[in-house]
Image (cartoon, rainbow, N blue to C red):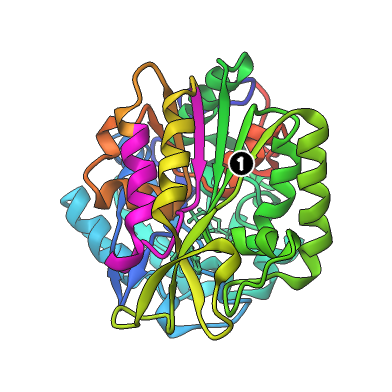
Amino acid sequence: MNKKTLKDIDVKGKRVFCRVDFNVPMQDGKITDETRIRAALPTIQYLMEQGAKVILASHFGRPKGKVVEEMRLTPVGVRLAELLGKDVKKVDEAYGDSVKAVISSMNEGDVLLLENVRFYPGEEKNDPELAKAFAELADVYVNDAFGAAHRAHASTEGIAHNLPAVSGFLMEKELDVLGKALSNPERPFTAIIGGAKVKDKIGVIENLLELVDNLIIGGGLAYTFIKAQGHEIGKSLLEADKIDLAKSFMEKAKAKGVNFYMPVDAIVADDFSADANSKVVAIEEIPADWEALDIGPKTAEIYRDVIQKSKLVIWNGPMGVFEIDKFAGGTKAVAEALAEAQGTYSVIGGGDSAAAAEKFGLAEKMSHISTGGGASLEFIEGKALPGVMALNDK
Ligand SMILES: Nc1ncnc2c1ncn2[C@@H]1O[C@H](COP(=O)(O)OP(=O)(O)OP(=O)(O)O)[C@@H](O)[C@H]1O
Ligand SMILES: O=C(O)[C@H](O)COP(=O)(O)O
């Protein structure tokens, strides 16, 4: 990487604004997967050992520029303190005089966690004033938030223009590992795209068609494609204004000779809940009042077979609502196929896919679990990541 890293600068006694990605899966105020917190520890511990005053900033969820009580970073601070074996002071703002006062009382090696940066409308707008306000808190900026590096926001991009700016260890490692896997990909190269963020991921699919031999679609975003094929999808997730785009992708795949795999069956439910009635149906037969919440067993078998014949697989986004056991089978089948595949380099991206691998006890069997979802996809697509571009050159 041609960007400066933490090892290139001296942080002793300095106030370091360290952007991390603590956007962890959470249910009822409990962290359900702490991969992203653990992944940030090497940088945080290094900063502590070097005698920096460590000021951590992160976003959590999508509060849209307002304070949302359930999206405070307080539970993350509690868990971080346990993992570090050290107090972590948490404040309820992310800049301003009261935060400055807390920072001025910090000792070398102390750790402070700021509030969710997305509580401020300027964050996602990359407002230069907010970037300046963040920068005023510190002497140095370290970006270790690989998972948010595809966002040009005030705490991931803007701030880097106001302070000496370097990457953290996690950022460096992610760019290194992903860069190596993709510089000359082994084939067959397969991408598996699932999850629920249809808007975010649909563009990615188009770019992946230029790179891969096989494209597997699952999760909530599959149903926009199924609809585009002319089937009814009941109450399944749909991005209606993307149907034509989905159609054009399927045509593009055909023209390019990319194998485009979509669910042939699904598990449908009459409610989005653990005690819903559910059944397996062929993909053309989703009942009007039901929604598809997982791929079906036939689809899982086909996907398993493709995965096992691949040399490089990137996987982003679960195949179904894996948080609920009865809709977890498809995601589990994909995770198992990846874990069992011999000689296949497997890269998992996305908070939820990583959480799923962890939930099924298969995380250790994957070649690389990236802490980035959208970020790893954009990197794979060959896009420049704003959070990386803004850092100082070596
Ligand atoms: N068929 C479906 N209908 C509705 N929701 C679904 C369906 N399949 C999966 N999901 C949901 O998608 C969510 C994950 O989607 P998301 O796109 O955020 O994936 P991700 O792996 O976390 O990627 P990223 O890190 O980029 O956000 C899960 O909470 C899961 O329950
Ligand atoms: O979960 C992620 O992919 C990152 O934390 C970025 O979150 P975002 O998609 O809400 O920007």
| Circle 1: element type | helix
What x and y, as percent, mark residue 175?
54, 28
Ligand 2 location (quadrant): bottom right
The residue shown at (59%, 49%) is 262
Give the answer, above or below, for where 334 lies relative to 27. above
Image position, residue 386 (x, y; %): 70, 43
Q: Foreground: 42 or 90?
A: 42
Check disc 1: other Cα within 10 Å, few if <14, some if 14-19, many if 20+: many
Residue 20, visible in the rendered structure: no
Residue at (65% x, 47% y) in the render: 150
Task: Give the x, y percent position of residue 265.
Answer: 50, 58
Q: Quadrant of residue 387?
A: top right
Towards the viewer: 289 or 366: 289
For disc 1, the marked residue is: 377
User: Does the numbered disc 1 mark a residue whose Cβ is under 8 Å from ligand 1?
Assistant: yes
Instruction: Give me the residue at 24% from left, 65% from top.
Output: 78
Q: Quadrant of residue 247?
A: bottom right
Which quadrant is the C terminus positioned in?
top right
Whether residue 215 is visible, yes or no, is: yes
Q: Give the image location of residue 366, x and y in percent.
A: 34, 31
Rendered position, 344 above or below 319? above
What are the residue bounds of the magenta stretch?
312-338
Label 1 sits on what residue type? Answer: Leu
Q: Is residue 269 above or below residue 222?
A: below
Image quarter hosting the N terminus = top right
Instruction: Please tell me which residue is depicted at 68% across the width and 39% down the height of the picture.
Output: 385
Q: Nearer the viewer, residue 137 or 348?
A: 348
Q: Is 323 part of what is drawn in magenta? A: yes
User: Camera-side residue: 338 or 16?
Assistant: 338
